[in-house]
Image: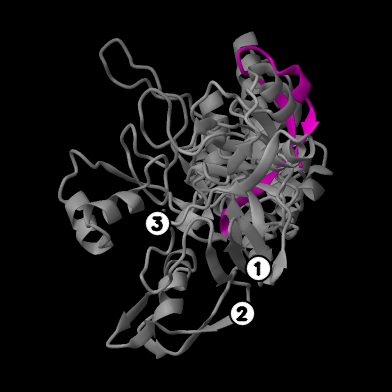
Amino acid sequence: MSAHQILVLIYIQLFLLLSPSIGLYKLFEKAGVPGWKAFVPFYNTWVMLTIAGRPRHWVFWQFVPVMGWFITMGIDVEFVKVYGRFKFWEHALAALVPLLYFPYLAWGEVEPKRGKSAKGAARPASKPANQGKPAPKAENAGKPGTPAPDERGAKFIGAAEARKHKKSKTREWIDAGVFAVVAATLIRTFIFEAYVIPTGSMEKTLLINDYLFVSKFAYGPRIPMTPLSIPFVHNTLPLVDRKSYVEWIKLPYTRWFEKPVHRHDVVVFNFPAGDTLINKSGYQSEHPYYDVIREQGNGNSDSGRQIVLNDPDDYPLILHPPDKQENYIKRCIAIPGDTLQLKDQVVYINGQAQPLPPESETYYIVKTKGQPLEEDVMRDEYDLDISNSDELSSRNNPNEYRMLLTARAKDKMLKNGVAVSITPDIDSTSQVWPYSKLVNWHLDNYGPLFIPRRGATIQLNPTSYTIYNRAIHVYEGNEFETRDGKYYLNGNEVHDYTFHYNYYWMMGDNRHGSQDSRFWGFVPETMIVGEASLIWMSWGHGVRWSRLFRKIR
């Protein structure tokens, strides 16, 4: 964690500790404790626990990042009980808005309404026996648990009296449910989360309807940048098609105990081109907004953007912050500082050829000896469904096929003599990122491309501007433009740029059936979610028993 990130966590904790201090000042006095103690961070919660008769070691749990925030909220709840506040909504206010609720308890008009006489006039309160005389000093004034006389605000009843309160069965269930939601949210945010594979972009490594555990600890848990959201849903509420979060509070990117992503890791991340989506069936991340505006403008994104913006009925847009963009899963091919290149489907990193993952698949032109292809043999031996036209199709030449094979199946087919020759089916027509005539790149012949590294500096020219513009402008939050052959960063002319984040290059194992970095570019470290670690369930026309509890490689 950087010093800046640590400071952000400290500031949030200090806010939680000090925001209720004005109200605490008076509430402490009501309990016979000097009010100044309310303004000393951590010591104030020590005093609150003492007054409430709760374990004071809770104070030390407040030093645990994020979990400490919830501990502080719990201390606030325990404290208001000694002022006779036991209702659920009262505890919710104490936990969520102590800045407002504690002053209300201290000074608000909370006395019960007085009755009325038969004639409608207010019935006067009985006259105190010591009216006009100084109030007697409490015998143990200044000690926790001894109330100071005060007729305004909530009355101090003490820890012993608060313990006499018994919850209803309904309330016990509600409190247990709230605890379960908080605990599950913490686990989901900081330890691991379950995901399901929706597409075939990682086949045959991962199959559709493989259910995965994704480790948040692998690269360090990321603090939610949009913390105010409904638990257990990502960005959209089911059924009502509305955002599941509000952006009233936005936190800067922070990752605890940061660890690097390694080459060949299978990574879950937020879809980099998912900040703007067309909120309509058939679009979303399946047909991204940036592809649509390029198509509508016949390659000119600016004119295509105007067409889309001028037609909100056909193209309803939805915007998402980085941590609420759709989740994708791919394999990390290149890490920060690498130079990547594809030559006839072979990936080269820093000039060195990289092996294909054993279960990755791509299209090959296969020439056989002319023997019939038996369905059972092809399925069992080579994991090929010859009845599926997406996996096998005939070519114009005799005994020649286009097959979707894994690297392992290809090698096995040659070894067993089923095929005379197997050559990659090279795609040299698909348009790929950065969709510019300045670079002549295609799906299977791509680069060379430098992957930005934190602290690395690039020289600005038309090609580098085209490639790195989105990273500098969107991911790193700068105003970046070119005018008259010059480059301007936040209003100032510049000739180079130094990156603030690390970036990664992600590709699917199904090399010809994957929407990956070749179509939308770099993945910034800010969007890394975690590492896919284990398949805990797999379903395809029934349970795929052989895949259960399989480690992902």
| Residue drawn at 49 percent across, 27 percent down | 389
| Residue drawn at 28 percent across, 20 percent down | 121
Among numbered discs 1 and 3, the one appearing first in the sequence: 1
Magenta residues? 526-553
| Residue 248 place in picture, x, y as percent | 42, 49
Secondary structure of the residue carrying numbered label 1: loop
Q: What residue type is labelled 1?
A: Pro
Q: Spatial distance from mark 1 to mark 3, Cα to Cα?
A: 25 Å
Secondary structure of the residue carrying numbered label 2: loop
Q: Are marks 1 and 3 in contact (CB under 8 Å)?
A: no
Q: Name the residue under label 1.
A: 336
Q: Which amino acid does label 2 sit on?
A: Ala
Q: Callout 1: 10 Å neighbours few (<14), some, many (20+)? A: many
Q: Quick check: 197 left or right of 469?
A: right
Residue nearest the observer in this picture, 340 or 78 = 340
Q: Do the residues labelled 1 and 2 touch (CB within 8 Å)?
A: yes
The quarter in which the N terminus is drawn is: bottom right
Q: Spatial distance from mark 1 to mark 2, Cα to Cα?
A: 9 Å
Query: For residue 431, which numbered disc appears in the image?
Result: 3
Q: Callout 2: 10 Å neighbours few (<14), some, many (20+)? A: some
Asked if residue 540 lies in the magenta stretch, the reply is: yes
Residue found at the very far left of the displayed protein: 310
Q: Which amino acid does label 3 sit on?
A: Gln
Q: Name the residue under label 2.
A: 456
Residue nearest the observer in this picture, 456 or 89 = 456
Q: In which quarter of the image is residue 73?
A: top right
Q: Callout 3: 10 Å neighbours few (<14), some, many (20+)? A: some
Asked if residue 472 lies in the magenta stretch, the reply is: no
